[in-house]
Image (cartoon, rainbow, N blue to C red):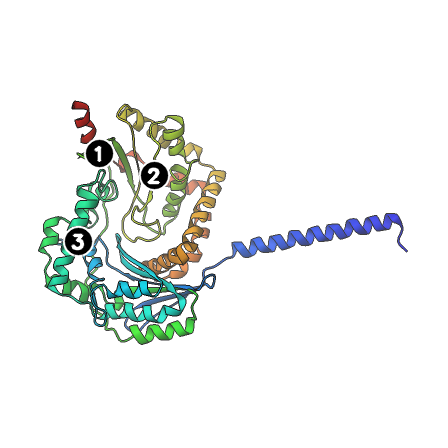
Amino acid sequence: MMTRFAIMRFSALFGLLLLLGSCAEEKSKEETASKFEVPVTYYTLDNGLKVILSEDTTSPTAIVAVYYNIGFRNEPRDRTGFAHLFEHMMFQGSDNLGKMEFIKLVQENGGILNGSTRFDFTNYFEIIPSHKLETMLWAEADRMKGLSITQENLTNQQGVVKNEVKVNVLNQPYGGFPWLDMPQYANENWYNAHNFYGDLEDLDAASLEDVASFFDTFYAPNNAAISVVGDIDVEQTKAWIETYFGSIPAATLPPTPDISEPRQEEEKYFVKNDSLANKPALALAYHMPERNTPEYYAMGLLDQILIQGDNSLLVQKLENEKGFTSDVAGGINYLGSMFNYKGPMLWMYDFTFDDAESKEAILNAIDEVMTGLKGQIDQKMLDQAVVKIRSQLYDDIGGTFGLGRADLLCSFALFDDNPARINTLEAEFKKIDVETVQRTIDTFLRASNRTVLEVNPLLAANEKTQ
């Protein structure tokens, strides 16, 4: 028989065991969470098509994403805007689907779809109920092997794209600012510095022969990657992809153009007059380190420290302390993320401000942050930046039914031949120490690596004179 004291000791011991068990269980959960990995099945068909499959059973949906290794950068020199024009052409019909029938097929099967042109790729995707996966694979293969290239379709889409340029850029306040403008000012190499949306004369000059040659050259399986993400049977999906894509012939790809940028040695300053803008605006850009280097990951952390979130240094200075603006925004790669590009890139941010504010005072405040940055960086600050970037990364991977996951998988397959990189990103950021960040500041956040673009609001000036 236990004494009261022994019972108390036993109860205390039992409680301690329960507590330790609970702690161990929580630790196990944390370890499991920290070890979360995106499942990646990666292989290449005989015709060169890169295939990435990633199972996710959280919802009965699937994503088919096809990425072609052709973007704004390496379109023909005398055909600016051609990569974007061709994105539109891909919805005009194929061997077995007439004009706009691809869109109708997706929507009538409960799905959504879109496409876009980026710096280094053009992509197309469908999010559909998973039981319609085979249908979508067939449809994507159908337009990969046989696009409907007619003069009627070309003329129609030339008009659509020209109207898009007029609506989104030419007749829009701050049109093209800064995503379209800044690369043209900050870069020297034509491939990085031309008008990506396209000059209207170049769009008009595109011929049917140009379109056919572009399709045959760049829309081949050996210049593409397909990712299928979602509630899928991996082996069945492999079989379907082989059936529908395996017989499409490869193409002879042209040499890759030199898209490198020279080192910038002097600060650049430009003013863009905008007849529709009612407030001045500033954009500031710095050339990025080369992808996948320690400095590249360091810039990802510096991006978080400087402009991402309310606690970032430039937001604190320009919005909260000085009250110059309320809309500081930016990042690495305005047409995507810091992960889905290949060539030279800019780290950039922009904001509008009131006429009453002194542009010199604003730039002085920015310089205060930048010149004092190196002395502020410590390990705690880097740890906080890692938490922020990890949160954003997980949001991207899980968001929109996994579309962010499909994007990273295709990007890493095209650019690195290694979609499993998706599971190493957090570890790469954690490797970055204070010394690496300080070296990155000295090398890339120097004033001589900066380009400043000012919007001069002519509408505001005209209103004052009336």
Nearest the viewer among 319 and 314 is: 319
Residue 160, numbered label? 3
Label 2 amino acid? Ala
Q: Quadrant of the C terminus?
A: top left
Q: Image quadrant of residue 45?
A: bottom left
Mark 2, Cα crowd under 10 Å, few <14 / some 14-19 / many 20+, is some
When the figure is inspected, residue 84 is found, relative to residue 287, above or below; the finding is: below
User: Label 1's element?
Assistant: loop
Residue 277, numbered label? 1
Residue 257, numbered label? none
Rendering coords of residue 52 (x, y %) = 37, 65
Q: Image point 76% across, 53% down: which residue?
A: 14
Label 3 amino acid? Val
Q: Image quadrant of residue 166?
A: top left
- Tell me the CA gap for discs 3 and 2: 30 Å
Q: Which residue is identified by label 2? A: 329
Label 1 amino acid? Ala
Residue 78 appearing in the image: no
Rendering coords of residue 284 (x, y %) = 28, 36
Residue 407 in the figure: left or right of residue 119: right
Rendering coords of residue 407 (x, y %) = 35, 57
Rendering coords of residue 150 (x, y %) = 13, 65
Q: Image quadrant of residue 280?
A: top left
Which of marks 2 and 3 precedes in the sequence?
3
- Tell me the CA gap for discs 2 and 1: 18 Å
Name, please, the residue furthest toward the front: 108
